[in-house]
Amino acid sequence: MPDQNLQSVLEVLYYGHSPTMAELEYMLAPNKNGSVRQMMQLADEVRSRHVGDGVVLRGIVEFSNICQSTCAYCGLNKFNTKPPRYQMTREQILEAVNDIAEAGIKTVVLQSGQNIHMDPFWLARVIEDIKHEFDMAVTLSVGERRTEEYLLWKQSGADRYLLKIETTNPGLYGLLHPGMSIENRFRCLHDLKNTGYQTGSGSIVGLKNQTCADLAKDLLFFQKENFDMLGIGPFIPHPETSLADEPCGDLELTLRMLSLTRILTKDTHLPATTAVGVAGSNDALGLALAAGANVIMLNFTPPAYQKLYEIYPGRENSESLSNRIINELENIAENLGRYISYSRADSLKYCNKNMPQKKALVDEH
Ligand code: 5AD
């Protein structure tokens, strides 16, 4: 039996009205029988209408695990002395990008730890080489950097940037990120948008001491900032961090967050994150796709390095590169009435913001 109260709140969101904190908290709270299904159904409809039925593939290259940050949840934090630290060469990165191109995928995500010693001009050259050799969108995910560096990489041809806020609760943010400030995170996100990047953010669900009110505020933040992409994934404890003994983020709560993000933000690109697969059942990927997600990231990092890039455990089982994986994804998509898309899939918001004539044409017809 659908919860009528929930249905009426969901409809308010569906028609584009801003929700109150109380409404969002009500929808995030557990123990309402079947309500997560109700939310997923609506999110799926919004997804179909605003971004279509394609499940877009992106290729990720984790080119370095060197990191000077101390994020409490992350296995790459500098206090974890176990994994040897690596940095791929420009040639190795180009080889991995070639594999992505051969798989027919049109986006490479270049991700690394937050390494203040990484030479920005070296990365600029890598971006230029990729743009010169391949017809591919370049997404960066290398953390908090200076305004000028963001500008340099944009001018070198980078198209997109991912920087999750992780949590919008300033107190919780401070506890989880010693030595960092949420103000600088906001500064980076605004710099990225102002520089013209298609900008992605997102949060971790199920962090220690995180409440439904915190998650509701994250949702309002996503809506207000109009991000082009949003990554929502559950917390996974890493044994070599201070949060090792904390429980995994709840899969159902993650699905609620994902669904609400889709319903609220409409045409954002939302990945079915690997963490969802780690926290949940075998079918978790399918569940995330049914809860509004429309993007999957495949890992093209050479296997020897992939093992050393352990932001959270369990990743190597759920993502590795093979035709088997792509075949499996095709089956999962087909079962949901979807298909795997090899399009570049630029931000729909960005296209509308930056090509006013095109938008006008669409609006006129
Ligand atoms: N659990 C879940 N997500 C994590 N990330 C890092 N560590 C963890 C963890 N233990 C996510 C963060 C970061 C992204 C690269 O990985 O959200 O932005």
Image: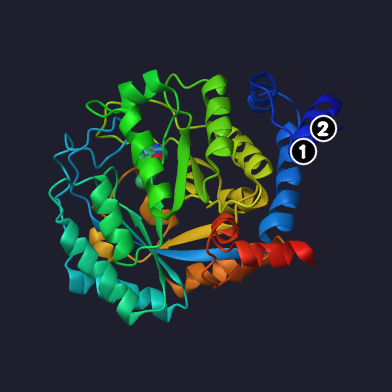
Q: Quadrant of residue 54?
A: bottom right
Q: Quadrant of the C terminus?
A: bottom right
Dot 1: within a 10 Å radius of its alpha carbon, few (fewer than 14), some, or many (20 or more) residues?
some
Residue 201 position within the rendered picture, expressed as x and y whole percent measured from the top left: 45, 43
Residue in the picture at 55% in, 72% down? 343
| Nearest the eye: 348 or 35 | 348
Residue 158 position within the rendered picture, expressed as x and y whole percent measured from the top left: 35, 63
Dot 2: within a 10 Å radius of its alpha carbon, few (fewer than 14), some, or many (20 or more) residues?
some
Residue 244 seen anywhere in this rendered image of the structure: no
**Relative side of 61 to 101, left or right:** left
Element under disc 1: helix
Give amino acid for label 1: Gln
Give amino acid for label 2: Gln
| Nearest the eye: 179 or 5 | 179
Residue in the picture at 19% in, 70% down? 90
Residue 135 seen anywhere in this rendered image of the structure: yes
Kindly identify which residue carries mark 1.
38
Q: Quadrant of residue 77?
A: top left
Residue in the picture at 78% in, 29% down? 9
Residue 7, labelled with which disc?
2
